[in-house]
Image (cartoon, helix red, strand yellow):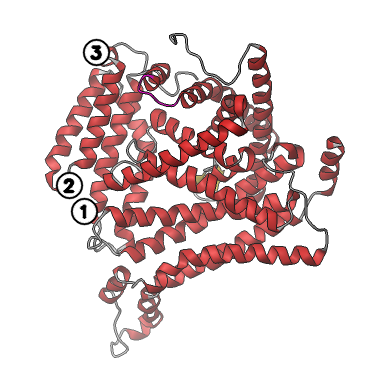
Amino acid sequence: MHIQDGTLSTPVCLAAGAISIGAVGYCLRQMRDSLADRTVPLTGMMASLIFAGQMINFPIGLPVSGHLMGGVLAATILGPWAGCVAITLVLFVQWALFSDGGLISLGANVLHMGVIGAIGGYAVMSTVRKLLGGGYRGTVAGSVVAAWLSVLAASALFCAELRLSHSPTNFAFGSLFALTVTLHALIGIGEALITGFAVSAIFQQRPDLVYGSGVEPASRARVAEVGRFLGAGLVVALAVGAFLSPFASSMPDGLEAVAEKFSLPTSDDPVSGFFADYDRIPVSASNWESVSVSVAGIGGTLVVFALALLLGFVQPRRQTTLAEATRE
Amino acid sequence: MSNFWDRYGRSVSPCHRLPPVLKIVLAVSIIVAGVAIPIEFWPAYGVLGCVVFAGHSIARVPMSYLIKRLLIFLPFILGMAVSLPLSQGFERGWDLMLTILFRGLLSFLVSLWLVNVMPFEQLLVTLRRLRMPVVFVAILAFMYRYVFVIWDELDKMRLAWKTRSFGRGGLLFRWMTLARMLGMLLIRSLGRAERIHGAMRARGWDGQVRWLDDR
């Protein structure tokens, strides 16, 4: 998952590093006020936890397995500032001890997972939470949506950085963007699931651990709630639209060329009967880019919506009352 | 388990005896050189590769260890590198793929060398001397102290889960269990952090990091 040295050009890495240093510096200053002397134990423990949590392998039915990135999870518990610092330290340790990710590209990795993952993710999470009126529902649904969007945003940013790093004559940007974002729309579902389940488990046991969990629902009215959920959906849809808009204009060239090259015999050929079905392949291949991205975008949005609904609204009654009872 | 990370960091060799700052400077300059040299001068990569290999053999890092780490690392960078020509229909992007592979491999091996000639506590002290923010170094030291504790706890939870479920159940169910496990781990470790914080307060911790060699 991490960007290695050499993938991005040095100027791009330095620019990303400069942004990251600024952001992390700002986070440190914010933390000085809010966490004070709890900074070291709390952030350190969270960073170790994310680090250890990445050792849990989630089976995906294939020989490979996925693991958590944790930006949104950290921000949900610690808040955006300490969450970003925790992720930064995790990334540093991963470089320093596991050689995972690079030294020069450390800034880029922090930008992707710390700044976008934790700070951006928290912004999305708290927006959705507010729109849903806080509480269990809002927090879990918000973290699910934020986790998915953070993965998608990081992959989109990675493509943009790759485009800035290498001359555009070398490769077709549009199709790379399509491939990467499609893949990450799927990976993001995993991240969203893990984050959602984990946050839901924490919220049931210790709602006080969740950062800003004191947000009280503004209104109990059903209709208003549905309206809020639609509002949250609009935010998500707009964000997805922002990602997908670049492709509307980009021309599919790389794969189209292949499609032309391998375009199969026309109907005059004697074998056409045999290949009849394959005639459709060039057509679909030339549209592959836009189709796949749209499918990834729409499918991913739907799945994440369903997840947010499922996790947020199917609320285990008994445990919540228990938690409430202990709070009183 | 404590030698799991910087496994050969405490062995003895000329490389280990180098001044800590020099080790970091050496590693950084080789990484920067590897990234800065354009692919047209590919023989330079070979030279740098030989230097790194020599460094590893002087530091007595076993070949089997290097290969093991490479096997874990290669699939990731291969996946990222191959996605370039793949997205271009295997027509273009090969040169870019090779660049990414070479540079990534070089920087990986150099980082691995740095880890294995330098124990983590030495790295921390050096980072502090290089004017890294004090809070950062303190949190890193805290991480190094407690990540093994959390790992052990995670291992216990995983063992408990395995003995009860034999790894059965549907995919979604397993995900749910694992994510719950993560949530429980989080609750437990944050509880531990609160206790540690209390203990630190009891011993006079006021949020100010002090080191033994401070004036």
Q: CA distance from mark 3 to mark 1?
A: 38 Å
Q: Position of residue A233 (x, y in %)?
A: 63, 64
Q: Is the residue B30 above or below the residue A114 in the image?
A: above
From the viewer's side, name the closer residue of A97 and B155. Answer: A97
Q: Is residue A239 above or below residue B69?
A: below
Relative horizontal placement of residue B45, taking residue A153 as reference (left or right): left
Element under disc 3: helix
**Residue that label 2 marks:** B39
Circle 1/circle 2 CB separation < 8 Å: yes
Callout 1 secondary element: helix
- Name the residue nearer the viewer: B56 or A136: A136
Kindly identify which residue carries mark 3.
B14
- Asked if residue A10 lies left or right of residue A186, the reply is left
Q: Nearer the viewer, mark 1 or mark 2?
A: 2
Residues at marks 1 and 2 on the same chain: yes
Query: For the residue marked with disc 1, what is the amino acid?
Result: Asp
Range drawn in magenta: B129-133
Residue at which label 1 appears: B95
Pointers 3 and 1 within a single chain:
yes
Quadrant housing the C terminus of chain A:
top right
